[in-house]
């Protein structure tokens, strides 16, 4: 029964994400996480020492999140059916693969209507300035986002669920939400969000590399693993470059290059050797890679837990 109480929430949560994605009408704990972070930031990000205050907020929110879900897990353990239902719901909340693919496809669909519509829709999912991007740059940005967030939004939560259960998955989501809200290198957050950004780097170190390897395995491109790990180091992020490099070599295209972020030009190095034009039908291939990578990790996690843990 112990193993079923791990496996069933994993499988049910995965299937719920495939079926529902992230409906905007459904209450979501990540919105609560965001509200807590915003409240803490308003109260603390004002006078020095900003780094210590930001670190304190991060530590309090992450430890509270893990403790809360750990206590729920203990309280529900004597009731297996209720335990499985509740844990399945939170595994579902931790995953974002269907919504990630839907958002990427929405950009391609809007781009088909016109460059202005494509730029506007892309601005919903990326931090860069989209106002001057051409069609190829918009498509490239979508693929970069799909690969990076395959790690952040799918494989990393599954990884932490595998080793720490729902408390681990939700802990990761809090860390990732902190980074997405205050982990910026701008005047407002440079010191206040520095601890959160570094913590997110640590949490994503292993999942990002696992994601890249699995992407290569499911596409039969494992021969590129050494090249991908070499290219992944070029990225300004210590982690995002690895799944991006994997997708660049799988699709024979090129990512990176200069882009504007919050009004500042960031000259990112190029990742990938082939400056191939991205066609509309390439999106379905990338979506299949995301689904295959997720399913592969799901099976791998289940087998490792069932036979080894």
Image: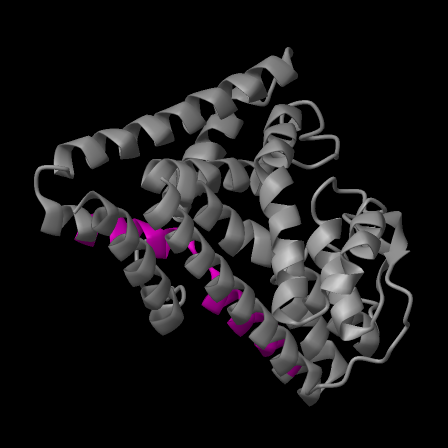
Q: Is residue 23 magenta?
A: no
Q: Farthest residue in the left direction?
A: 79
Q: Farthest residue in the top direction?
A: 49
In this rendering, position of residue 133 left or right of residue 208: right
- Return the x and y of residue 103 as percentages of the image width and height: 55, 70
- Return the x and y of residue 308 as percentages of the image width and height: 38, 42
Q: Is residue 142 above or below residue 64?
A: below
The quarter of the rendered structure image containing the C terminus is: top left
User: What colouring method underlies this structural image?
Assistant: one colour
* Magenta segment, prevailing SS (helix, strand or loop): helix
Q: Quadrant of residue 46?
A: top right
Residue at image x 73%, y 51%?
242
Q: Is residue 192 above or below residue 294?
A: above
Residue at image x 40%, y 64%?
22
Residue at image x 69%, y 23%?
191
Q: Is residue 10 above or below residue 284?
A: above
Magenta highlight range: 85-108
Q: Answer whether residue 211 is visible to the viewer in this image.
A: yes
- Return the x and y of residue 257 as percentages of the image width and height: 89, 57
In this rendering, position of residue 108 left or right of residue 102: right
Q: Is residue 91 magenta?
A: yes
- Return the x and y of residue 88 as percentages of the image width and height: 26, 54
- Along the line of sight, the residue nearer the viewer: 134 or 153: 153
Residue at image x 18%, y 31%?
74
Number of marks in picture? 0
- Along the line of sight, the residue nearer the viewer: 156 or 295: 295
In this rendering, position of residue 70 left or right of residue 32: left
Q: Farthest residue in the front direction?
A: 307
Q: Answer whether residue 29 is visible to the viewer in this image.
A: no
């Amino acid at each position: 029964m112990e193993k079923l109480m791990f496996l069933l929430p994993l499988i049910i949560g995965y299937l719920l994400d495939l079926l529902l994605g992230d409906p905007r009408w459904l209450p979501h704990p990540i919105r609560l996480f965001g509200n807590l972070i915003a409240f803490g930031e308003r109260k603390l990000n004002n006078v020095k020492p900003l780094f210590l205050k930001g670190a304190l907020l991060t530590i309090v929110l992450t430890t509270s999140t893990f403790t809360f879900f750990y206590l729920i897990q203990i309280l529900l353990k004597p009731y297996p059916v209720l335990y499985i239902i509740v844990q399945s719901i939170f595994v579902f909340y931790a995953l974002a693969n269907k919504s990630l693919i839907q958002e990427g496809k929405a950009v391609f669909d809007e781009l088909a209507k016109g460059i202005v519509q494509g730029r506007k829709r892309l601005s919903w999912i990326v931090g860069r300035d989209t106002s001057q991007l051409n069609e190829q740059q918009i498509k490239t940005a979508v693929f970069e986002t799909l690969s990076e967030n395959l790690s952040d939004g799918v494989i990393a939560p599954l990884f932490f669920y595998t080793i720490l259960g729902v408390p681990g998955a939700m802990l990761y989501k809090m860390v990732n939400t902190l980074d997405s809200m205050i982990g910026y290198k701008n005047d407002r957050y440079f010191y206040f969000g520095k601890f959160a950004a570094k913590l997110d780097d640590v949490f994503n170190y292993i999942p990002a590399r696992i994601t890249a390897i699995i992407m290569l395995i499911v596409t039969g491109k494992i021969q590129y693993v050494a090249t991908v790990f070499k290219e992944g180091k070029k990225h300004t992020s210590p982690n995002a470059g690895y799944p991006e490099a994997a997708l660049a070599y799988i699709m024979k295209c090129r990512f990176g290059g200069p882009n504007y972020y919050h009004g500042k030009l960031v000259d990112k190095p190029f990742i990938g050797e082939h400056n191939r034009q991205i066609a509309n039908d390439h999106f379905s291939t990338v979506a299949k890679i995301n689904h295959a990578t997720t399913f592969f990790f799901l099976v791998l996690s289940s087998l490792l837990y069932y036979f080894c843990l």
